[in-house]
Image (spheres, rainbow, N blue to C red):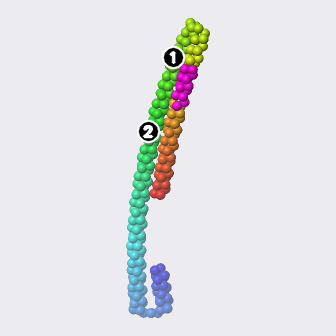
Amino acid sequence: MKRQLLSALVLTAATFASLPAANAAETKAVTDIQKTRLEFLSNQTKDIEDIQKTRLEFLNNQTKGIEDIQKTRLEFLSNQTKGIEDIQKTRLEFLSNQTKDIEDIQKTRLEFLNNQTKGIEDIQKTRLAFLDAQSKELDNIQQLQYDEYLDSHSKAITDIQKTRLEFLSNQTKAVTDIQKTRLEFLNTQTKAVEDIQATRLTQLDSLSKAVK
C-alpha cells in the first residue's frame, strides 16, 4: 500500500512538472482524479487493516482455545497421577498391614514354642530331681543291705536311670526337631510374603510408568 501511495505521489508530481502552463480546469480535474485515487487507496488500506485485525482476533481466539484445552488436559493428567499415587499408597499400606500381621503371628508362634521349650525343661528338671531323690534313696538302702544285693540293685537302678535319661534325650531331640521344623515353616512363609510384596511393588511401578 505504501508503494501505491508513493506511485500516486510521484505521478502527481510528474503531472505538475510536465504541465506548468495548464489551465485551472485541467489542474482541478487532475487533482480530483488524484483525490479519488488516494481515497480508493485509503479505503483499500483500511479494508486490509480490518482484515488483519479480524485475522489477529481469530488467531488470538484460537490460541486461547488451545491454551484452555492444554490446561484441561494437564488438570486431567494431574488428577490421574494423583489417583494412581493414592492407589499406590493404599496398596503399600495394605502390604504393610499384611507384613505386620505376619510378624505378629510369627511372634505369637515363637512365644508358644518358647513356652513349650520351657515346659519341657521344667519337666526334665522335675524328672532329674526325682531321679536324684531315687538315687539318694538307693544310696541309703545300699548302706543298709548286703553288698551283693546292693550291687545288683544298683545295676538295675543304673539301667533304669540310663533308660530314663535316654527317653528324656529322645524327647528333647524330638522337641528340638519340631521347633526346627516350625521355624523353617515360618521362614518359608515370610519369604513367600516378601516375594508377593516385591511382585506387587514391581506391578505398581510398571503401572505408574505406563500411565506416565
Front-lying residue, 88 or 197: 197
Would residue 35 be seen by someone viewing this image from the given angle?
no
Cα separation between marks 2 and 1:
43 Å
Asked if residue 33 is positioned above or below residue 150 in the image, the reply reads: below
- The residue that label 2 is drawn on is 101
Which circle marks residue 68 in the picture?
none
Front-lying residue, 42 or 69: 69
Tell me: 63 left or right of 144. left
**Dot 1: what SS?**
helix
**Dot 2: what SS?**
helix
Dot 2 and dot 1 residues touching (CB under 8 Å)? no
* Amino acid type for the residue under numbered disc 2: Asp
Q: Position of residue 205 (x, y in %)?
A: 49, 52
Furthest residue to the top? 144
First in residue order: circle 2 vs circle 1: 2
* Amino acid type for the residue under numbered disc 1: Phe
Asked if residue 166 is positioned above or below residue 54 in the image, the reply reads: above
Tell me: 90 left or right of 124. left
**How many residues crowd mark 2 within 10 Å: few (<14), some (14–19), many (20+)?**
few
Magenta extent: 159-174
Q: Position of residue 6 (x, y in %)?
A: 48, 82
